[in-house]
Amino acid sequence: MIVLSMDSSSLVTTVALLKDEHILGEFTINFKREHSVILMEKVEELLKDCEVDINDVDGFVVSKGPGSFTGLRIGMATVKGLSMGSNKPYVSISSLDALAYSLLNFDGLICPIMDALRDSVFTCIYKNIDGKLTKVIDYSALSLEELATELNSLGEKVIFTGDGVYKHKDYLLANIPKAIFAPNHLSIIKASSLGELGMIKLKNGNFDDKNSAPLYLKKPQAVRELEQRLAMKNENRL
């Protein structure tokens, strides 16, 4: 099975091509460029470099988030277009799952964190149970204080990964005694991790459909601000 996977949920743009257990190629760019410009450019470049025709791809994998609202919409729209155009299935995988999967062999808690602004993070807590990535706490948007309370209550060593580490490392070190951190090269989302997880779903026939939507966890800031303004207007009328 040949799988094309991609992620645009953060500043990182990453695209990978996998054939069964082999990674044929991967581009990962951690630089502020527009996903709408670079994503398809890298897809086309990767297919060309690996001498794979788009018609030879058996399925597609995309990150469903959480992450950047705009980035998630671009990635999802791109994969849906490729899927419809080629009449091949696609699946969506959480960006948090992909981050955690790179640390599957860690013998403690695995905690990917993605910056959600205002001293909060998107997160999920995992453990390796019988060789499988298993959720201990489900996908959540938590304040740093809430995250520290949850992890300290579990009482196990925990490894952090994700772009939230760069911003919040000092807080995590000061408030979570058993915290350790993944190396930098494992702290960004890799399309190859998405692809491996997605290939399992594709082989099992667990496809997404045209109605699949990103996993946001929080409302867009513009929506939250509008709701706050409406609430203030309502209060003023009382």
Image (cartoon, helix red, strand yellow):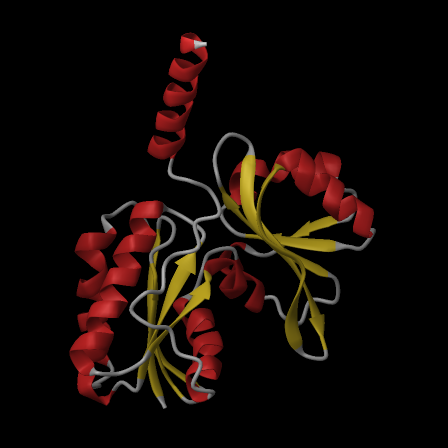
**Residue 199, placed above or below residue 38:** below
Toward the viewer: 194 or 33?
194
Toward the viewer: 180 or 82?
82
Residue at 30% x, 61% y: name it. Answer: 76
Toward the viewer: 150 or 224?
224
**Residue 37, placed above or below residue 79:** above
Task: Say which quadrant the N terminus sits in.
Answer: bottom left
**Residue 169, placed above or below residue 216:** above
Residue at 23% x, 64% y: name it. Answer: 78
Residue 123, position as x, y percentages in the image: 57, 50
Residue 157, position as x, y percentages in the image: 77, 55
* Residue 156 falls left or right of residue 227: right
Residue 164, position as x, y percentages in the image: 53, 44
**Residue 201, placed above or below residue 109:** below
Q: Quadrant of residue 225?
A: top left
Q: Quadrant of residue 44?
A: bottom left
Residue at 17% x, 54% y: name it. Answer: 37
Residue 125 visible? The answer is yes
Q: How many marks?
A: 0
Residue 146, position as x, y percentages in the image: 68, 38
Toward the viewer: 172 or 131?
131
